[in-house]
Amino acid sequence: MARREEERLDNMLQGLSKSNVTKETFGTGLKNIRDTVKKSADKVVKYYGDTPWGDEVKSIQEALKEIKQAEQLEELQQLTDQYLKVLAEPLINRKLTVNYFKTAVMQPFFGQPSFLQATANSLSYEEHIDRFQQDYILPVLLEAKMRTIVEQASTSNEVLAFLDEYQDYSPFKAIKRKVKKRNLGEIRAFFEQEMSHCTLIEGQLATINFEEMMFSPLGVSQNKALNFNWNLAKDETIPISSLAKLILFCAPAGAAVYLRKDGFGEQGEYRTYMGFVQSDSPLPDVIRKNRYFQIAKQGMEPFDRVVSRMIEDVKQKAGFVADHLLFIEFSSEYRAKKTLLDYYHLPRYLAEYLSHHADELDHIRPWEYREQFIRHVLKGEDPRHMITRLLRQNVESGYSGWSAYVATRERYRMRQYAKHLGEGGSAMDAKEKRVRAVYRVYRSGADIREKFNQRGPREGAPEGQYAASGAKKISGIAYRLLNAANANNRKSFMDTVMRLHMSVDKPVPVFFLDALHERELDFHTVANAFVAGLLSEKYEVAKEQNGEGVTVDG
């Protein structure tokens, strides 16, 4: 917790230390620092208010109120250093870290069982361990010991004596009621034939029923889903063992925990996700992959780069990419009864593509579109609708279409890789030539834009009548083309294209006619590449080196 706060405050102070910081910017940054300090300082006061630490954070908060001007930046730095020193105290840091981990990571997936309850926040670190031991570890040990007693006992009294000794464990009370009048052979038959077995772990006896608080992503409504009940028994929903309960509780330990943005722009929402990588390789290799995945996601590494680097690692070790990587991401909110689950299998064609062209995806911006692009592909979905959305944003904001062109080109290139492998490995060089054809479509759109810019707004307009600028005309045309392409209305799209070319005295390129029959390029590739070109200036078109389909900086 102390390290997290230090990183946040350092970033804020770096922003305030810039030479061009304005009075308004300093005021906003100062408020953010005060709010950040207050959030953790209040917790220190709550738990350690009667100690010197509590008095110190109170004085720091009072001193922060006296900071008003940028000239007091050095004093502000000293106060934050003093505050971080208090947070770094082992007792305080450990307590705040545990409580933050419980609230931010564990509770969305488990609710508030055991020590995750809000009332348990006042417990010490050692008391948290004791509660975990009592509620999760001890039941597993007791059930294992019970099985041993049943197998090794020479009389029924030994089994009953054991159940009496640990009668505080509620499942044992129910078991004793059913076996107290049976002999040893009948007791063993009860455990083997009558008692339910764990539905999650083979060979384990079921002593409890699954509940949402054991792992919210797998939760079901017990009152409204009778078909989930075991043998349709109302008092027996999904029988599991205490060992299964413990393993479910430990699920976050093996997963990467990170923030992921779902959606686009201001309408997007950041959610806490857990991610895991599964493969057919030996367990130590799976563990190593997941450690890398954790480090990469904590460093906000883009998803496509994480995947491509894992592929490179596999290629170096095994010489091929047939590792069957499976990526699992899930987000859960216990209070909202909501779970989101995504899982991606890495097909061989995509592995081949990423091993050769992963860097090209760096040019898809904003980054949230890049993330959605690769996730669509990993799901086996066509990302063309995402590209259409990106083009619409470019039209609305006045941004260049270069990023959308790269996305269009790489979508097409991926399709060529899929076809290449589907045909048993035909020469990819021939298919790369088709990829270069996407650039010609893009360039033709940029040529049209340049013609409009050269004509000016007044050319051809009656005297005294308003005439839109070339950029505004292009925006209107781009909208019309996008609507036609999105609706797959090829007739309307071609009609607009023909009128557009006639208005600038240019012939309609043959690839538009080919696109209608999809002889070389598919219709949506042509449509999106052309619209992207309409939204790009001439200097941006030069980013494509010699029309070879390779992105270079420009």
Image (cartoon, rainbow, N blue to C red):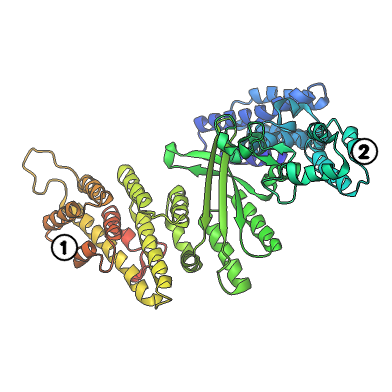
Q: Is residue 66 visible?
A: no
Residue sticking out furthest to the bottom: 427
Q: Which residue is mark 1?
A: 508
Horizontal arrangement in the rendering, residue 540 relative to residue 217 (left or right): left
Q: What kind of residue is marked 2?
A: Asn
> Residue at 92% across / 38% down in the picture?
157
Q: Picture quarter containing residue 450?
A: bottom left
> Residue at 21% across / 62% down in the picture?
516
The image shows residue 454 at horizontal and vertical percentages of 18, 54
Tell me the crowding category of disc 1: few under 14, some 14 to 19, or many 20 or more residues within 10 angstroms, Cα based.
some
Query: Is label 1 in a helix, a strand or a loop?
Result: loop
> Residue at 86% across / 49% down in the picture?
151
Horizontal arrangement in the rendering, residue 57 relative to residue 495 (left or right): right
Reply above or below: 544 against 29: below
Earlier residue among tags 1 and 2: 2
Q: Picture quarter containing residue 90?
A: top right
Query: Spatial distance from mark 1 to mark 2, Cα to Cα?
Result: 95 Å
- Of 450 and 49, which appears nearest the observer? 49
> Residue at 68% across / 50% down in the picture?
254
- How many callouts does the rendering have? 2
Query: Is label 2 in a helix, a strand or a loop?
Result: helix
Q: Is residue 374 visible?
A: yes
Mark whose residue sits in front, 1 or 2: 2
Horizontal arrangement in the rendering, residue 51 relative to residue 432 (left or right): right
The image shows residue 430 at horizontal and vertical percentages of 35, 76
